[in-house]
Image: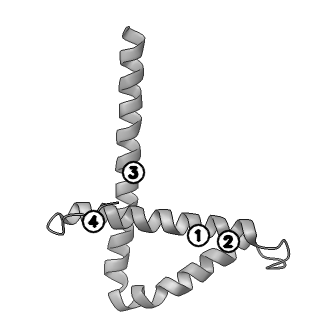
Amino acid sequence: MASADTEDYVSTFVEELLRTGIMLSGLLADLLEDLPEDAFPGEAPEHVLLEMVTGTIRPAADVAGEIPVRSAAALIASSRARVLGDLRRAVESASQREAER
């Protein structure tokens, strides 16, 4: 991905969100795949890895503070909902155009 124009804060946010999401998804998928069956006896490996990632991120989140972190989480959740909504509408529109042909 090319670096976003630093004056467009929304593009910068989207680029960082995507880079981080892709990196974390790939990393956790690889770790889950490579873990031995008995790596965490009695615990779900995905929960253990989530706790590990949370522990890694917690110091940065604590420095930022609860309100900004909650605001960032809300922004991410809202972004996800808007993307899914727009994609659903695009699929519906394409299906409707196809049906009209």
**Label 1 to label 3: alpha-carbon separation:** 24 Å
Q: Which residue is mark 4?
A: 3
Where the C terminus falls, by quadrant?
A: top left
Amino acid type, label 2? Leu
Q: Which residue is mark 2?
A: 31
Which marked residue is nearer to the observer: mark 1 or mark 4?
A: 4
Amino acid type, label 4? Ser
Q: Establish if 71 lies above or below 78.
A: below
Q: Position of residue 91 (x, y in %)?
A: 41, 30
Amino acid type, label 1? Leu
Label 3's element?
Answer: helix
**Label 4 to label 2: alpha-carbon separation:** 28 Å
Label 4's element?
Answer: loop
Q: Position of residue 4 (x, y in %)?
A: 24, 63
Asked if marks 4 and 2 touch (Cβ < 8 Å), the reply is no
Farthest top residue? Answer: 101
Amino acid type, label 3? Ala
Q: Which residue is mark 1?
A: 27
Q: Position of residue 88 (x, y in %)?
A: 41, 36
**Label 1 to label 2: alpha-carbon separation:** 6 Å
Label 2's element?
Answer: helix
Label 1's element?
Answer: helix
Which marked residue is nearer to the observer: mark 4 or mark 2?
A: 4
Farthest left residue? Answer: 7
Q: Residues within 10 Å of mark 4 (few under 14, many from 20)?
A: few
